[in-house]
Image (tube, rainbow, N blue to C red):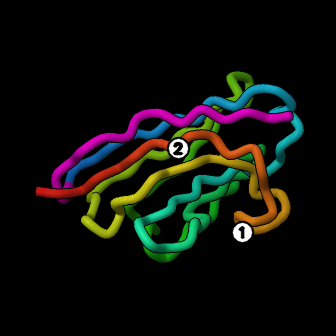
Amino acid sequence: QVQFVESGGGLVQPGGSLRLSCAASGSAFTIYIMGWYRQAPGKQRELIAAITSGGSTNYADSVKGRFTISRDNPKNTVYLEMNNLKPEDTAVYYCNSADLGPDPREYDAWGQGTQVTVSS
């Protein structure tokens, strides 16, 4: 069973930056595609960025050009660099596998997530 621990969230002003980290343990070495998901208040959880073990990346249109996902395979850690943050980026951010596609309902073993609040 894989476990995920997200960290790095906080309160930031619009235009600011944050770097999120996700430490995976258990059977994490079996995950080919890792993803960052977020869930805003009153909205469904959604996949916003994904990275393969080889480093290929894909982003949701809402974050493309502002967010960068990266991965340290030996450390089983995934990062999300977020720049030019907007109030609509306010959400709880989670990491998990994306091997079965972008629907978060395909996955269990979610961590606690890390809250990102963008506000002046």
Amino acid type, mark 2: Gly
What percent of the width, then of the height, locates residue 23? 63, 29
Residue drawn where x is 45% and y is 42% of the image: 114
Residue drawn where x is 84% and y is 63% of the image: 100
Residue 14 versus residue 65: which sits nearer the camera?
A: 14
How many C-alpha atoms fall within 10 Å of the one at disc 2: few (<14), some, or many (≥20)? Answer: many
What percent of the width, then of the height, locates residue 3? 73, 33
Amino acid type, mark 1: Pro
Look at the picture and state if 37 lies above or below 101.
Answer: above
How many C-alpha atoms fall within 10 Å of the one at disc 1: few (<14), some, or many (≥20)? Answer: some
Mark 2 and mark 1 lie on one chain; the one further toward the N terminus is 1
Q: Which residue is mark 2?
A: 113
Q: Which residue is mark 1?
A: 102
Which quadrant would residue 48 be assigned to in this image?
A: bottom right
Instruction: State the extent of the magenta-drawn residues as a range.
Output: 1-15
Residue 35 drawn in magenta: no
Residue drawn where x is 41% and y is 35% of the image: 8
Q: Is residue 73 left or right of residue 65?
A: right
Label pair 2/1, CB-CB below 8 angstroms: no
What percent of the width, then of the height, locates residue 33? 77, 52
Look at the picture and state if 29 lies above or below 96.
Answer: above
Residue 71 versus residue 89: which sits nearer the camera?
A: 89
Residue drawn where x is 82% and y is 27% of the image: 26
What percent of the width, then of the height, locates residue 42? 44, 72
